[in-house]
Image (spheres, grey):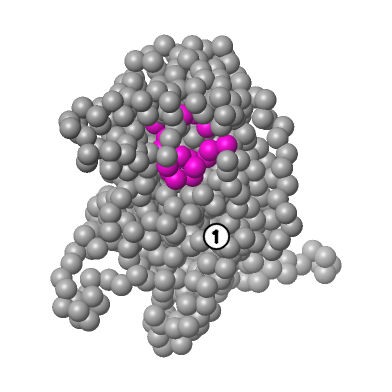
């Protein structure tokens, strides 16, 4: 028998254990797929606890947020580096945060979602580096970033490395501010230094019952001051949506919240070099809205809901209001007019008669600056009796806060249209985008009153001696008020002096705003070269 005919295969030994499977590509692929599947599935007990808390997992949230099948994950197999006794062998893949990119209505966004089922979503060095990576990519690609926050805070075992990780996030957020839209969604705890990330975002969403955000938790507060306070009472969604103004939008459940995030993204450009995504024209330039003449009472002291006016002016009556529960005396919303995205700022007579106060000025100023940064034209609906008087407001810094709104409008270079719906008194008239601070087009309804103050107040100040000496002060006051209104507050006084461009029929407001935005579409205005201005923070 020749050598070629000899069977050289090893003879199996009975009872011997089979050796390891050869390292073929097929084996490596199976091992990789198994690890991926285990990582995506997560710890079953952790997932169950998350669901018991009424919360979705990080991956379930991303499935709800992004277009189906669009998510591309980055850093799935990343793990914490330290392997000392303090880790207790716990080095799970992803390190508690899922990062990557996907699309919303076909438009690119970058995302990260903290995974509370892994180490409580706590932030360590590798967790932070994954977030840094996706933030850098978002800035390089010129695409919005959405952060889904659900974390126990800094990972204590990693010490200063965790704090350094937060610092890297904050630094990148500031670098990206005004360059790409930043949206933060709080879906669980967000405590300590982590709370600064939502505060730096352009828009922050919170969910009632599960989201909570504070710098110092209830236990520490109790230990230091003896004050007893619950998590929701200290930093729940309604606190930040109605009292602090940190949350722009508050929802009752995660699905509704994430759907609203999708809606917001549909109104925003990818970055500061793009125009907002336009829809098809809706015929607004020829659209009469006679109901507008019925919504607003002619009498300056009678209230109405400015939302009804906005609904008649914008396409389909659809607008995305932000900070609805905070400083409700001013309304801020994103909408479309003739398919083009606009930012709407309006005084709200249903709350504090629509006066401006410290909170309202801050709310509107931040919104105006956002719109200007991202090429969103501004429409300002004015019905303001002035700034809220009183020692509380003066001592709270209403001068400084009002100056923020003044600064924001003066600095804005986007197309700006002002509509004086009814009254516009004093310094509040000036800061609500008047001609004097640079609005491009000022329109007014035939019931407009533009003056230093209301007629009654003006007469009391100017004619106080005459009134004291009058035989019948009340009768004389009525005469003087009527005379003041006729001479200085009639609807055509401001147009006669060039402070208003045109007095329009209320029914033509939607068409007039659309016409104004069309003629301003190609507006170009460069600011003086400087490092940056000094906003009266």
495 lies above or below 66: above
Q: Residue 116 lies in magenta, yes or no? A: no
Q: Split into 4 quadrants, where in the image is the N terminus?
A: bottom right
Which region shows up in magenta? 417-435
Please tell me whether residue 308 is drawn above or below residue 322 in the rendered image: above
Q: Nearer the viewer, residue 423 or 293?
A: 423
Give the percent coordinates (x, y) of residue 190.
36, 63
- The residue carrying mark 1 is 535
Seen in the image, is 289 located left or right of residue 20? left
Say left or right for 175 vs 197.
Answer: right
At which x and y percent is residue 243? 29, 54
User: Number of numbered discs present?
Assistant: 1
At 27% from the left and 59% from the top, the residue drawn is 392
Q: Which residue shows up at 58% across the image and 56% down it? A: 177
Decide if residue 275 is in sight here: yes
What residue lies at 42% left-to-right and 39% top-to-bottom? 452
Assign a secondary structure to mark 1.
loop
Image position, residue 472 (x, y; %): 17, 31
Q: Which residue lies most toward the bottom here?
A: 85
433 part of magenta stretch: yes
Name the residue nearer the viewer: 84 or 295: 295
């Amino acid at each position: 028998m020749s050598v070629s005919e000899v069977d050289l295969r090893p003879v199996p030994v009975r009872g011997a254990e089979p050796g390891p499977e050869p390292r073929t590509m097929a084996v490596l692929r199976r091992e990789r797929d198994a690890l991926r599947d285990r990582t995506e599935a997560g710890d079953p007990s952790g997932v169950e606890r998350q669901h018991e808390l009424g919360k979705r997992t990080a991956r379930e949230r991303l499935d709800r947020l992004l277009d189906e099948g669009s998510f591309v994950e980055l850093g799935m197999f990343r793990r914490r580096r330290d392997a000392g006794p303090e880790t207790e062998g716990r080095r799970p893949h992803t390190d508690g945060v899922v990062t990557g990119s996907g699309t919303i209505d076909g438009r690119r966004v970058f995302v990260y979602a903290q995974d509370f089922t892994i180490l409580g979503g706590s932030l360590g060095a590798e967790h932070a580096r994954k977030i840094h990576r996706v933030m850098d990519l978002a800035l390089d690609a010129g695409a919005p970033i959405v952060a889904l926050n659900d974390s126990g805070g800094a990972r204590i075992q990693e010490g200063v490395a965790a704090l350094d990780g937060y610092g890297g996030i904050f630094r990148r957020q500031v670098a990206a501010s005004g360059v790409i839209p930043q949206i933060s969604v709080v879906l669980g705890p967000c405590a300590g230094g982590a709370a600064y990330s939502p505060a730096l975002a352009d828009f922050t969403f919170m969910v009632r019952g599960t989201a909570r955000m504070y710098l110092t938790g209830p236990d520490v507060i109790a230990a230091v001051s003896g004050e007893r306070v619950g998590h929701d009472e200290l930093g729940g969604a309604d606190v930040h949506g109605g009292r602090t103004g940190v949350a722009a939008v508050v929802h009752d459940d995660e699905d509704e919240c994430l759907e609203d995030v999708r809606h917001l993204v549909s109104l925003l450009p990818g970055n500061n070099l793009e125009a907002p995504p336009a829809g098809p024209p809706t015929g607004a330039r020829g659209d009469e809205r006679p109901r507008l003449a019925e919504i607003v009472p002619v009498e300056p002291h009678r209230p109405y809901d400015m939302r009804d006016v906005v609904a008649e002016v914008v396409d389909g009556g659809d607008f995305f209001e932000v900070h609805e529960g905070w400083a409700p005396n001013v309304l801020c919303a994103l909408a479309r007019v003739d398919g083009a995205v606009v930012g709407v700022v309006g005084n709200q007579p249903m709350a504090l008669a629509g006066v401006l106060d410290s909170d309202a000025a801050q709310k509107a100023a931040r919104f105006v600056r956002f719109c200007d940064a991202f090429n969103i034209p501004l429409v300002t609906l004015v019905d303001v009796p002035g700034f809220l008087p009183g020692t509380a407001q003066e001592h709270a810094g209403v001068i400084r806060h009002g100056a923020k709104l003044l600064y924001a409008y003066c600095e804005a270079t986007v197309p700006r249209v002002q509509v004086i719906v009814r009254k516009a008194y004093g310094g509040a008239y000036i800061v609500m985008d008047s001609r004097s601070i640079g609005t491009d087009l000022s329109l007014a309804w035939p019931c407009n009153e533009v003056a230093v103050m209301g007629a009654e107040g003006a007469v009391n100040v100017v004619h106080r001696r005459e009134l004291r000496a009058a035989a019948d002060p009340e009768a004389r006051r009525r005469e003087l008020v009527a005379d003041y209104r006729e001479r200085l507050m009639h609807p055509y006084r401001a147009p006669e002096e060039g402070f208003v461009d045109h007095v329009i029929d209320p029914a033509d407001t939607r068409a007039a705003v659309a016409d104004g935005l069309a003629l301003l579409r190609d507006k170009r205005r460069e600011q003086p070269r400087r490092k940056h201005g000094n906003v009266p923070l």
